[in-house]
Amino acid sequence: MAKILVYNNDTNRMETYYRGESEAMPYNTGRTLTVREFRGSSKSPTLWTSKRAMQSWNTQRYIWGGPIPVGFAFKRSWEGGHSNQSQHYAGVAFDVAQTWTNARRTALRNSAENSGVWSYVEPVSLTPTWVHFDKRALSSACSSGGFPLVKRGSVGMYTLIAQDDLNTLGYTTRWARWNFWCCY
Ligand SMILES: [Zn+2]
């Protein structure tokens, strides 16, 4: 059983769900993305994503027209992933098709680039053995990459992530929590 926080981009609210590992992710249609697929190897008891990311997945999956094997989507900041720009820490990025042939991956990468639903599709030169696409909400705060800027008054997904990181490092994030919880 996972606790799943979903940032609803339409209402600017965080929503809370509880789902079993073999159940579909919130907002998932056609049961094409289970909690287990979404979390991959992450051990986190709480997962998070955005409604937009789930809708983008639904659309991509519909356009592709068949199953897409998911290696993982979610990672907490310190659980790895393949770069600090990949946004798996936000639960809005997907690494898929690891078990496919290069030709089939190329077809899917082209489909993802042409679908128009993603903010970013990683080029084959960076991820030759899987396809990465994501629905990031904010761009990085500095030109060299990394995390979006979160400051007093910020709400939503990236505030939650900053809070999670700071709490893990032992800091008290009362301001972040207040700003976050005020959205309920
Ligand atoms: Zn990725």
Image (spheres, rainbow, N blue to C red):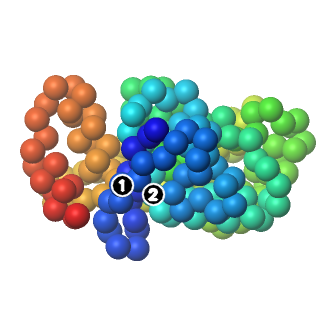
- Dot label at residue 16: 1
Say whether residue 55 is visible: yes
Q: How far apart are marks 2 and 1 (CA)?
A: 11 Å
Residue drawn at (67%, 65%), measured in percent from left and top? 59
Residue 25's spot in the image, x, y percent?
Answer: 55, 52
Relative horizontal placement of residue 128, taking residue 134 as reference (left or right): right
Mark 2 nearby-residue class (10 Å; few <14, some 14–19, many ≥20): many
Name the secondary structure under disc 2: strand
Screen quadrant of the C terminus: bottom left
Q: Name the residue under label 2.
A: 50
- Which of the two residues, 113 or 31, is positioned nearer the viewer here? 31
Which one is earlier in the sequence, the residue at label 2 or at label 1?
1
Residue type at the position of mark 2: Ser
> Residue 145, can we see it?
no
Look at the numbered disc 1 and give the secondary structure of its residue: strand
Quadrant for residue 16, please give it.
bottom left
- The foreground one among 97 and 11 is 11
Residue 48: percent from left, percent from top: 42, 47
Amino acid type indicated by mark 1: Thr
Residue depicted at x 55% and y 27%: 41
